[in-house]
């Protein structure tokens, strides 16, 4: 019964498309698997803390989480304003214009993923193949995996895996991803329990014994690891001081991993309201903050179980070998689940743990090319790319041309990566390009209430303001500042090893290529009588 | 000949206004609304004791005090494709308890809305030379057919009533294969195939035939919709897409090979596809945002070919 002052509810009739939305869990799942703690987090971010000897990881994690919260608000806002837009390309094109959007999205969601294929392959190598080869003492395989040929083969496996996922389609992959989530969480839970209830002395002894057994090391390998990393204090003991200063320098490393909670959630049903904005936002927010909490728990447990100095020394020694600046006590990356499994002194059990942890990779790596298909299709529907690239095979509905446009260059890039040492430095900036695309989207979010006033005002988001300023503009500004600061640090500071001039030129060439494609398409289509500027031109209402 | 094709406006007043202006804006000879004209929701504006009115839009509760405020609120409601209805507290309570009352009111507002749209079209396009076509589809009650058929400027068509367009024949069908919502014009594939046969009987030559079939062809990528659970919630957060188009429509296109095939129904599946020699288009729909998604198609009447097409978000 309606009570005076109670909000009346609307009446719906039977009509197509009236769905009940989605569960917060689904939104959480995509976000959580995208900012993948085990793959990106452990390998890209938490392994490099030793490069910032004055930084505090706990402070850096909290600060990054707070800033990423604004990126989540920005993207949830854009989703609620343009729910079927399908991502950065359409959001940017509607606010900033088709040319800018095409250049930023095509580089950030298509071209650059060719270069990410070797990055994904590296993670598959160090988290699955190399640990398994080491556990079964397949020395020839371990050597092969570390060779150029081995790297190329792992790249091919990664590219093939991503291609299979695109062919299977998102429905099947979403199921696989859900199983991967449960498996991955179970495996992580087990390792956390080992780290919680195991003692450091127990680990030290297990590490020394297993290293001797698997890698033929002698003596106290634990102590040798600390020694090879340059001493007892690779990083400060855990704490929160300094909260800023050196801790801030860790943030651009963390951004390599934690920048993508906005992945996925781009679609929800009709007859929507503010609750949908909150639902999408909370899904991504949970993904972000659960990951941050897992990272904090891991750091605390790593300090207790491995020893904080050892954990960082082992990682630093690994990177010193990669960069040719030092030695390590063991020949593979000190993958934390593998190290933790040493306490069981059971090769089979260790192999099972490594394999089950592989679910983190499978549930994440499949999305390598899925987003590219969307962008390629969108650009083809806008007549910027040829119509044919959006063709799907009649029998299996596989986007054949789009797939080829992703796979073939990725294989070529992988070959160059594996066999040309110089080329590896060319793609160092690959991680930056996605941040540039997000930066463009945050600018679009800032301008949205003014550039697309009608669109904005008809959305549930229009009600949310901070001191009279649209929430999406406030969140977009903070996100842009955060991304801008990270980009500046990546470009300016050699600490992050991505301010390589050749790499910058190489990445710049990608933007130039995208721009050339756009301009050629514009001229070509104009001759056909198609005006690309008309795509987002608003028709007058009165 | 230049066609401007939109679909699935679902009562969005702002989209209809844009549609009526689109002919002049894009220099189109014919503007076509491919179906699903009417809205899906009514927003009650409830009169409270003391003379104020309560309403909620997009989960935001508003108390309206003046006629101007009610008018402004109603406009916002209509721009999203919903129908504002003013009701007393008793009426509101009665409607909450009785589905028949809701259905009756829905029918009234849908017919009123359609009549108003037809009148707007008459005002706007009479004497301009721009032809306007609007066909009902699965989400439209049958009662609007008579209103459209009786309109002066607005033309309409169905399986039995083709529309001649500058030497081309456009055959229309608003019926679709079954949906989880059991809407007004749904039929199993065999019955749909019969309806298509009836429609195609009016087509003389594939090269001068344009299909305006609301249901997209199955597996054409113009028909990818989010998979749904039995309770109509999204499978895997809406990421799991599934082809839900009509196999009969696809079979008809493959067999008859019309010049052009225009579709809608699946709002999120904007795109183009070639099925043999036929160009098939679904411009999609973002009616709630007030964005008019459309396909602009230029046809060479002499060569009987599609010269160009473009999907726009106006």
Image (cartoon, rainbow, N blue to C red):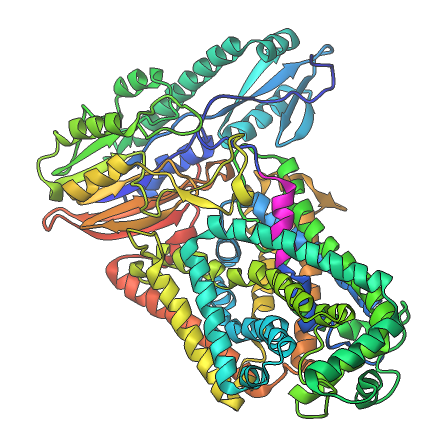
> Viewer-proximal residue, B230 or A20?
B230
SS assignment for the magenta stretch, majority? helix
Residue displayed at 56% across by 71% down: A120
Counting from the top left corner in percent of width and height, residue B7 is at 36, 36
Counting from the top left corner in percent of width and height, residue B119 is at 36, 22
For residue A25: magenta?
A: yes
Q: Is A166 positioned to the left or the right of A207 in the image?
A: left
Instruction: Decide: is A248 above or below A288.
Output: below
Quarter location, residue B66: top right
Instruction: Decide: is A88 above or below A237.
Output: above
Q: Quadrant of the C terminus of chain A?
A: top left
Counting from the top left corner in percent of width and height, residue A259 is at 65, 63
> Viewer-proximal residue, A67 or B131?
A67
Residue displayed at 46% across by 58% down: A165
Instruction: Decide: is A384 above or below A456.
Output: below
> Viewer-proximal residue, B31 or A230?
A230
For residue A137: magenta?
A: no
Q: Is residue B29 at all visible to an observer of this figure?
A: no
Counting from the top left corner in percent of width and height, residue A532 is at 36, 58
> Viewer-proximal residue, A300 or A491?
A300
Provide the residue span drawn in magenta.
Answer: A22-33
Q: Is residue A354 at all visible to an observer of this figure?
A: yes
Quarter location, residue A526: bottom left
Residue displayed at 41% across by 23% down: B182
Residue displayed at 33% across by 30% down: B177
User: Count the marks: how many?
Assistant: 0
Q: Quadrant of the N terminus of chain A?
A: top right
Q: Is A42 positioned to the left or the right of B304 in the image?
A: right
């Amino acid at each position: 019964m309606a009570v005076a002052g109670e909000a009346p509810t609307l009446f719906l009739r039977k009509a197509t498309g009236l769905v009940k939305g989605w569960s917060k869990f689904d939104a959480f799942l995509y976000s959580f698997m995208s900012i993948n703690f085990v793959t990106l987090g452990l390998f890209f971010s938490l392994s490099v803390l030793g490069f910032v000897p004055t930084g505090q990881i706990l402070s850096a994690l909290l600060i990054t989480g707070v800033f990423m919260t604004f990126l989540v608000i920005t993207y949830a806002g854009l989703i609620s304003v343009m729910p079927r837009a399908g991502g950065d390309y359409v959001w940017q094109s509607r606010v900033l214009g088709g040319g800018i959007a095409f250049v930023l999205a095509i580089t950030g969601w298509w071209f650059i993923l060719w270069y990410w294929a070797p990055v994904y392959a590296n993670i598959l190598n160090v988290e699955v193949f190399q640990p398994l080869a080491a556990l079964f003492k397949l020395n020839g395989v371990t050597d092969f995996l570390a060779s150029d040929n081995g790297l190329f083969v792992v790249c091919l496996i990664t590219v093939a895996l991503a291609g299979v996922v695109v062919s299977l389609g998102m429905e099947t992959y979403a199921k696989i991803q859900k199983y991967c989530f449960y498996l991955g969480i179970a495996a992580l839970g087990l390792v956390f329990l080992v780290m919680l209830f195991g003692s450091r002395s127990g680990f030290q002894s297990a590490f020394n014994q297993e290293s001797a057994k698997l890698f033929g090391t002698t003596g106290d390998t634990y102590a040798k690891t600390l020694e090879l990393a340059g001493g007892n204090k690779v990083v400060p003991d855990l704490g929160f001081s300094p909260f800023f200063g050196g801790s801030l320098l860790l943030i651009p490393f963390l951004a390599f991993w934690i920048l993508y909670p906005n992945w996925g959630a781009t679609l929800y049903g009709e007859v929507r309201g503010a609750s949908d904005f909150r639902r999408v936002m909370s899904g991504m927010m949970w993904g972000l903050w659960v990951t941050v909490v897992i990272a904090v728990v891991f750091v605390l447990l790593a300090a207790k179980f491995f020893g904080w100095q050892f954990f960082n020394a082992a990682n630093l020694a690994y990177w010193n070998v990669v960069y040719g600046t030092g030695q390590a006590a063991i020949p593979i990356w000190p993958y934390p689940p593998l190290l933790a499994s040493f306490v069981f002194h059971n090769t089979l059990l260790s192999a099972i743990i490594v394999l089950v942890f592989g679910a983190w990779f499978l549930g994440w790596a499949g999305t390598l090319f899925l987003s590219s298909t969307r962008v390629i299709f969108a650009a083809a529907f806008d007549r910027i790319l040829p119509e044919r690239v959006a063709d799907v095979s009649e029998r299996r509905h596989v986007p054949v041309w789009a797939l080829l446009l992703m796979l073939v260059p990725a294989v070529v890039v992988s070959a160059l990566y594996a066999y040309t040492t110089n080329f590896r430095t060319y793609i160092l900036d690959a991680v930056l390009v996605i941040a540039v695309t997000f930066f463009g989207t945050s600018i679009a979010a800032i301008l949205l209430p003014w550039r697309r006033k009608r669109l904005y005002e008809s959305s549930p988001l229009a009600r949310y303001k901070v001191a009279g300023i649209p929430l999406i503009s406030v969140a977009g500004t903070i996100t842009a500042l955060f991304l801008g600061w990270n980009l500046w640090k990546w470009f300016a500071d050699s600490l992050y090893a991505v301010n390589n001039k050749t790499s910058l030129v190489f990445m710049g060439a990608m933007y130039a290529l995208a721009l050339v494609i756009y301009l050629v398409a514009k001229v070509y289509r104009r001759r056909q009588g198609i005006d690309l500027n008309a795509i987002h031109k608003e028709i007058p209402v009165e | 000949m230049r066609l401007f094709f939109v679909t699935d406006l679902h009562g969005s007043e702002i989209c209809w206004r844009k549609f009526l202006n689109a002919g002049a804006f894009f220099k189109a000879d014919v503007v076509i609304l491919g179906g699903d004209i009417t809205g899906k929701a009514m927003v009650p504006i409830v009169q409270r004791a003391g003379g104020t009115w309560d309403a909620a839009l997009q989960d935001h509760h508003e108390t309206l005090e003046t006629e101007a405020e009610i008018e402004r609120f109603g406009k916002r409601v209509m721009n999203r494709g919903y129908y504002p209805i003013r009701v007393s507290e008793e009426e509101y309570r009665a409607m909450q308890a009785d589905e028949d009352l809701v259905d009756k009111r829905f029918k009234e507002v849908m017919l009123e809305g359609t009549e108003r749209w037809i009148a707007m079209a008459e005002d706007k396009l009479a004497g301009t030379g721009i032809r306007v076509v609007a066909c009902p589809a699965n989400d439209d009650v049958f009662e609007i057919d008579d209103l459209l058929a009786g309109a002066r400027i607005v033309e309409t068509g169905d399986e039995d009533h083709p529309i001649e367009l500058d030497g081309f024949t456009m055959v229309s069908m608003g019926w679709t294969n079954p949906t989880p919502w059991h809407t007004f014009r749904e039929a199993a594939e065999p019955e749909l195939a019969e309806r298509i046969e009836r429609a195609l009987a009016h087509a003389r030559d594939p090269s001068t035939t344009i299909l305006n079939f609301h249901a997209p062809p199955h597996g054409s990528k113009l028909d990818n919709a989010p998979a749904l659970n039995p309770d109509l919630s999204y499978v895997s957060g809406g990421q799991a897409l599934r082809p839900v188009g009509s196999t009969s429509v696809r079979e008809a296109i493959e067999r008859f090979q019309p010049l052009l095939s225009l579709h809608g129904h699946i709002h999120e599946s904007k795109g183009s596809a070639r099925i043999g020699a036929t160009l098939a288009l679904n411009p999609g729909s973002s009616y709630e945002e007030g964005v008019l998604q459309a396909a602009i198609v230029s046809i060479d009447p002499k060569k009987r070919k599609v010269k160009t097409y473009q999907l726009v978000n106006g």
